[in-house]
């Protein structure tokens, strides 16, 4: 058995990341679902949907919740669900984080959450050197 992954994001984000991961990896190595609270949906209804998905994903090893933006509605829902069920919630969801997490399906829930967090920390970098500051105003030479 392995932990499940629940993506709770703004509309379109989670499902797009899930579909992209599936296109890259083929079959997903972890049970995963994406949920986005809808504008017209009550917080109670969104929480009910999240609870139902968590029930489906938790096969006894827990669920790691990944969310896109801390403090926004999806992030608040993720934190509430995580606190209520004792699931780890990792914010700042992006594709490198998701792919790295999916590459370790055998890890227990807490170690899988740490893997997601480590991927978030190491996955954001400046890929090109900064432009030289030649005008004294931080604009570079262009």
Image (cartoon, rainbow, N blue to C red):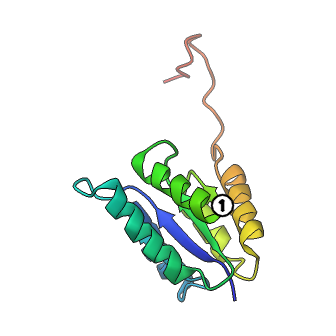
Q: Which residue is mark 1?
A: 88
Q: Residue furthest top?
A: 136
Quarter of the view holding residue 12: bottom left
Relative horizontal placement of residue 122, taking residue 12 as reference (left or right): right
* Vertical placement of residue 92 versus 142, above or below: below
Q: Residue 7, percent across and down? A: 49, 66
Quarter of the view holding residue 59: bottom right
Quadrant in the picture for the N terminus: bottom right
At x 49%, y 47%, the residue is 69
- Can residue 15 be spotted in the picture? no
At x 62%, y 62%, the residue is 97
Q: Residue furthest left?
A: 40
* Vertical placement of residue 126 versus 137, above or below: below
Element type where label 1 sits in the image: loop
Q: Residue 64, percent across and down? A: 62, 68
Q: Residue 90, percent across and down? A: 62, 56
Tell me if mark 1 has few (under 14), some (14-19) or many (20+) residues whose alpha carbon lies within 10 angstroms of its own: many
Relative horizontal placement of residue 72, taking residue 128 as reference (left or right): left
* Vertical placement of residue 72 versus 137, above or below: below
């Amino acid at each position: 058995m392995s932990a499940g992954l629940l993506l709770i994001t703004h509309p379109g984000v989670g499902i797009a990341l899930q579909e992209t991961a599936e296109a890259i990896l083929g079959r997903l190595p972890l049970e995963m679902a994406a949920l986005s609270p809808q504008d017209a949906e009550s917080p109670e209804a969104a929480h009910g949907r999240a609870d139902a998905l968590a029930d489906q994903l938790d096969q006894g090893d827990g669920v790691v919740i990944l969310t896109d933006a801390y403090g926004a509605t999806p992030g608040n829902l993720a934190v509430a669900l995580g606190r209520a069920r004792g699931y780890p919630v990792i914010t700042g969801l992006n594709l490198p984080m998701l792919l790295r997490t999916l590459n370790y399906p055998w890890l227990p829930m807490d170690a899988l959450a740490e893997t997601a967090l480590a991927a978030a920390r190491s996955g954001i970098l400046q890929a090109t050197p900064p432009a030289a500051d030649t005008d004294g105003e931080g604009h570079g030479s262009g």
